[in-house]
Amino acid sequence: MPYAAVNFHVISGTVTFGCAASCTLTADSTGLAQTTVTGGAAGILQLSAIEITGGAFVQVSITDTPLSAPLPSPTQLNMSPRARP
């Protein structure tokens, strides 16, 4: 059985995913599709992941904050789509 294809994209904010500005990845055997996320500017970032064939989705908001001692970049964000209610 093939694994789900998941499309990652930016709803608002400045972000680059490890796979591109917007990309489609295939979930692994556990159903997880993942990519790194690098913020491009301080502020609220809204990201989404949508399963292309089944319509499951997840949307997250994170805040990119400039720090005096920055954390290692890029940050890994695991987005596991769930079925719509």
Image: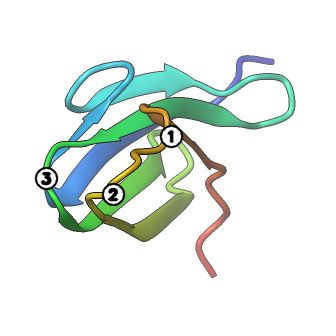
Residue on which the image places disc 1? 53
Q: Nearer the viewer, residue 11 or 13?
A: 13
Tell me which numbered mark, 2 or 3, is placed earlier along the sequence.
Answer: 3
Residue on which the image places disc 2? 67
Which disc is residue 41 wearing?
3
Q: Position of residue 13 (x, y in %)?
A: 14, 59
**Which quarter shows the N terminus?**
top right
Q: Nearer the viewer, mark 2 or mark 3?
A: 2
Q: Position of residue 4 (x, y in %)?
A: 63, 31
- Type of amino acid at the residue the image marks with label 3: Ala
Task: Specify whether 25 is left or right of 70.
Answer: right
Q: Position of residue 56 (x, y in %)?
A: 56, 58
Q: CA distance from mark 2 to mark 3?
A: 12 Å
Above or below 52: residue 41:
below
Q: Nearer the viewer, mark 2 or mark 1?
A: 2
Task: Specify whether 22 is left or right of 71.
Answer: left
